[in-house]
Image (cartoon, helix red, strand yellow):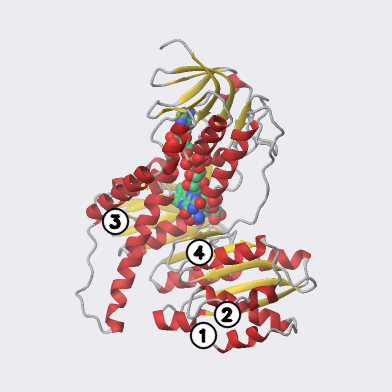
């Protein structure tokens, strides 16, 4: 091990949070080192959204190819070559990495980047060393080590897989049990159903996608079932996993009744927990909360005043835009300037399942707890663009405060849901009234136009005279 390199700021982890944190600290003039176990980009680039969404794109292409006959185009039945798809996944991850403008900016800010450094761990509150033999002494640190898939203390758990194992499969498994109906589980289940796997999705709670609007959970579960997936909500609790000749059996029980499900592969996606096991946080005096995430205040300062944390490791909203924002805030706050606080800005969330789903703002149930609301719903089987594209499964729901006419929430299931919701998020962030949104002449025929139509319906319910509202409703 070499003697310690002296820095002002050391950032641990080069995912979105770490990249922004290092960039910001470097921009503010701190001698900054960015140290990461693996590659630049972190889980987001190599194991999360980028590769998973590439698989989702393949699933979408398969679906689109199967629809060609409806439009008079003859082709033979599409056949998936999974190995070639994985080559494409690696190609995309490489392209994203090569195009990453942040790498140049970080270099220009004078940050030294140590990739493949091995896991970093604290030796004392101001010193870290990495498995690769690097040693740093610094005034300040920013922890950006992300998260890991939560494990279940259940016999036979070692027989199960996580979404990451998709990258080492050589072929699409014939059958799959997915445990956990959150964002990750739903995405894995949806993608492999499209690839031809017979999938059973097991959710312990009353409904899949529990943080979405209830109508969204219902619609997505129904579409999954129509696609041939078995969706079991409130299925009970798992007793054990055991090996079978063809794969793995999951034994579970509900109300004292034992049952089991078998598959070639069992994928567990029951949540995300902080990746701190290698860091030796005790040596630095950094505390974690009851869920194991690094405890931070509004300035992203940990219990050790010279150490900050950003991104998934803090267990707040675990998404790329939030990780980037956290990184900016933590990087800024390492400088001795007035401290930035993290804010709860409106955060559009969505996923590339089939059908897609997305949300911005409050769910209907949450909005009703504190507001008198008007709700407008436009079904995708009643709008022009969705009819043209043959994408009639889904809806757009807009929730509006009756007194102020401001938009409280937007929930969408169906084609381009994730993109559609971005416009709603902008309207919510801008504090727009629903009649103002209804007056914007959105292009025709478009998916975002469906939002305009929902706004028009809500405006009419509020008895606001909006000419354009009437026009939009005609389409
Ligand atoms: C399957 C899946 C799909 C997702 N899809 C989306 C999506 O569509 N949109 C979205 O916004 N978000 C999505 N997310 C969430 C998103 O990926 C995370 O919120 C984001 O990556 C968090 O960024 P981060 O910088 O905090 O951590 P990460 O991206 O996890 O990066 C952490 C880095 O720290 C390194 N590290 C860990 N420990 C150490 C150590 N001891 N020493 C040195 N380095 C260390 C790791 O190797 C890694 O490089 C998805 C997540 C998953 C699992
Ligand atoms: N936007 C996206 O496309 C996307 C995709 C994947 C992940 N993510 C992010 O990553 C984070 C983690 O996602 P996730 O899906 O891993 O976790 P999650 O916490 O969102 O969902 C876990 C699900 O597993 C269920 N569960 C818990 N214990 C169970 C058990 N013993 N048996 C069966 N079900 C059980 C929970 O009720 C929940 O529905 C999310 O908060 C999200 O922000 C985002």
Between 155 and 79, the one lying in front of the other is 79
- Residue at mark 1: C-beta within 8 A of ligand 2: no
Q: Quadrant of residue 355?
A: bottom left
Q: Nearer the viewer, mark 3 or mark 1?
A: 1
What is the quadrant of the N terminus in the image? top left
Label total for image: 4
Extreme residue toward the right, this view: 403
Marks 4/1: CA–CA distance: 19 Å
Q: Is residue 406 left or right of residue 228?
A: right
From what the image shows, is residue 27 above or below residue 50?
A: above
Query: Is disc 3 surrounded by few (<14), some (14 to 19) or many (20+) residues within 10 Å?
Result: some
Secondary structure at numbered mark 4: helix
Secondary structure at numbered mark 3: loop
Secondary structure at numbered mark 2: strand
Give the residue pinned by disc 4.
418
From what the image shows, is residue 464 above or below residue 206?
A: below
Q: Nearer the viewer, mark 3 or mark 2?
A: 2
Give the residue pinned by disc 3.
173
Q: Earlier in the sequence, mark 4 or mark 1?
A: 1
Residue 366 shows in this picture: yes
Asked if the residues shown at circle 2 and circle 1 are in contact, with their CB atoms under 8 angstroms apart, the answer is: yes
Q: Earlier in the sequence, mark 3 or mark 4?
A: 3
Query: Is disc 2 surrounded by few (<14), some (14 to 19) or many (20+) residues within 10 Å?
Result: many
Q: Is residue 165 left or right of residue 34?
A: left
The label number, if any, that marks residue 391 in the structure image:
none
Marks 3/1: CA–CA distance: 38 Å
From what the image shows, is residue 314 above or below residue 196?
A: above
Q: Earlier in the sequence, mark 3 or mark 2?
A: 3
Give the residue pinned by disc 1.
382
Give the residue pinned by disc 2.
378
């Amino acid at each position: 091990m070499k003697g310690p390199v002296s820095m002002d700021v050391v950032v641990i982890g080069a995912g979105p949070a770490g990249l922004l944190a290092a960039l910001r600290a470097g921009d503010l003039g701190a001698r900054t080192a960015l140290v990461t176990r693996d590659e630049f980009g972190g889980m987001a680039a190599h194991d999360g959204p980028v590769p998973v969404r590439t698989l989702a794109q393949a699933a979408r292409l398969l679906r689109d190819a199967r629809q060609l006959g409806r439009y008079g185009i003859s082709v033979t039945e599409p056949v998936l070559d999974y190995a070639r798809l994985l080559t494409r996944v690696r190609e995309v991850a490489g392209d994203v990495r090569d195009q990453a403008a942040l790498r140049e900016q970080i270099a220009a800010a004078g940050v030294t980047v140590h990739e493949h450094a091995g896991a970093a761990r604290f030796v004392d509150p101001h010193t870290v060393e990495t498995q690769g033999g690097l040693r740093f002494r610094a005034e300040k640190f920013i922890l950006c080590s992300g998260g890991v898939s939560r494990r279940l203390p259940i016999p036979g758990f070692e027989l199960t897989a996580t979404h990451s194992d998709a990258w080492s499969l050589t072929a699409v498994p014939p059958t799959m049990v997915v445990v956990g109906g959150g964002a990750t589980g739903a995405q894995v289940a949806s993608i492999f159903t499209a690839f031809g796997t017979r999938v059973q999705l097991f959710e312990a709670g009353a409904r899949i996608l529990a943080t979405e609007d209830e109508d969204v959970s219902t619609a997505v579960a129904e579409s999954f079932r129509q696609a041939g997936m078995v969706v079991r909500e409130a299925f009970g609790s798992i007793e054990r996993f055991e090996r079978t000749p063809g794969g793995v059996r999951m034994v579970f029980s509900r109300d004292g009744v034992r049952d089991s499900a078998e598959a070639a592969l069992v994928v567990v996606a029951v949540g995300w927990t902080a990746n701190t096991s290698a860091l030796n946080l005790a040596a630095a005096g950094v505390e974690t909360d009851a869920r194991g995430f690094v405890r931070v205040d509004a300035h992203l300062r940990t219990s050790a005043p010279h150490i900050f944390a950003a991104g998934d490791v803090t267990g707040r909203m675990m998404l790329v835009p939030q990780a980037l924002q956290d990184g900016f805030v933590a990087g800024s706050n390492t400088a001795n300037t007035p401290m930035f606080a993290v804010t709860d800005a409106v955060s559009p969330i969505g996923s590339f399942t089939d059908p897609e789903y997305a949300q911005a703002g409050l769910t209907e149930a949450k909005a009703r707890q504190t507001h008198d609301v008007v709700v407008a719903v436009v079904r995708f089987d009643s709008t022009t663009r969705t009819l043209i594209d043959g994408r009639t499964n889904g809806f757009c729901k807009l929730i509006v405060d009756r007194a102020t006419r401001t938009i409280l929430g937007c929930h969408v299931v169906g084609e381009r849901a994730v993109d559609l919701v971005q416009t709603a998020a902008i309207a919510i962030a801008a504090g727009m009234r629903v009649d103002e949104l209804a007056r914007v002449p959105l292009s025709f025929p478009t998916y975002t136009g469906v939002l305009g139509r929902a706004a028009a319906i809500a405006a009419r319910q509020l008895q606001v005279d909006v000419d354009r509202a009437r026009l939009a409703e005609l389409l």
